[in-house]
Amino acid sequence: MTSVPQSVNRSIQPARKSRLSKILGSQWQLMLMSVPMLLYVLLFNYAPMWGWLEAFKDYSSKSALATGNAPWIGLDNFRFLFTDPLVKDDFLLSIRNTLAMSVINLVFGTVSAILLAVLLNELRSKVFKRTVQTVTYLPHFLSMIVVVSIAQNIFATNGPLNNFLMSMNLVKTEVFWLGDKKYFWWLVGIINVWKEVGWNTIIYISAMTSIDPCLYEAAAIDGAGRFQRILHVTLPGIKSTFVILLIMNIGHLMEAGFEIQYLLGRGVVYDVASTIDIFVLKYGTEKLDIGVATAAGMFKSVVAIILLIIANMTAKALDEDTLI
């Protein structure tokens, strides 16, 4: 095996440095614009990770809470999550609910966003297209408190939905949408879709605008109808965008949300509404067991990272676009 001469190696290093300095010199405006976002990520995403140390401490005593000098106990808090009879059932229930609602949100959100983007892309009237886009993505800017209040009015026993269903003789009695466990997960998915579908279509519409119009013209010449052009030109054209967004969304499978479940999940539907975030809030603020609460939050983050890596490796094995 031949080795690279030192003179050649030394000449490569200055070339790399000069190339990097040239890039920095020509794009210093972009680098400067990225500084606030970089500081934001470091301050609010990475600096709080210092708090993960509390997952390895024992805060069960009042003296530890009062002084903050909790003793180190290693992985006992993590074992406590999966071995203690009372805590284990509550934690496993929150994991089940989180994954179930996350999968529903992922499927509903992805399908609805792609479907709406395809329909908007097929519209010929620019005025109507922009109007629909504006109307559909405005709910993204509403507070979740407002969204939940609207949902409570719509799905109330004497709300407009029940009145409509009864007027059409589709149901004989009023349906208790907000108090029946079998409806809760689906209601969360519907509320999330209504709030975010317009915003989620923006990326897909942008991807569709980058598709070469010649492909549509060639397909039309070959006799392809509108549905066939969507199936064989539009959808393959956004496949790489879909894969990237899918990988990112899989990394958020452990985050089903907090506001909707916390606001609507009181009373009889608590068993299907409790998520990991609610579990962390319960043990961190109500029971003041900071170590167990931090361990649960750390578990969620670690599992999310593992899911993200697995999804990225799977996409790479299938020769698709990946994040890394």
Image: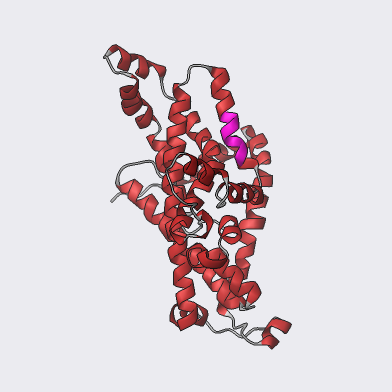
- Residue closer to the observer: 37 or 173: 173
* 115 sits to left or right of 37: left
Query: Which residue is painted at 26% across and 14% down in the image?
Result: 222
Question: Where does the image place residue 255, in percent across and percent down from the top left?
Answer: 51, 57
**Secondary structure mostly taken by the magenta-highlighted segment of the chain:** helix
Residue 14 visible in the current orientation: no
Q: Residue at x 67, y 45 (%)?
A: 35
Q: Quadrant of residue 238?
A: top left
- Image coordinates of residue 8 in percent, x first then y, are 44, 43
Q: Is residue 138 magenta?
A: yes
Q: Position of residue 284 (x, y in %)?
A: 62, 73
Of residues 319 and 307, the one nearer the viewer is: 307
| Above or below, 65 relative to 235 | below
Q: Is residue 187 above or below residue 138?
A: below
Q: Which residues lie in the magenta part?
A: 133-139
Numbered circles on residues, count = 0
Q: Residue at x 33, y 24 (%)?
A: 227
Answer left or right for 245 relative to 14: left
In this rendering, is residue 187 above or below 28? below
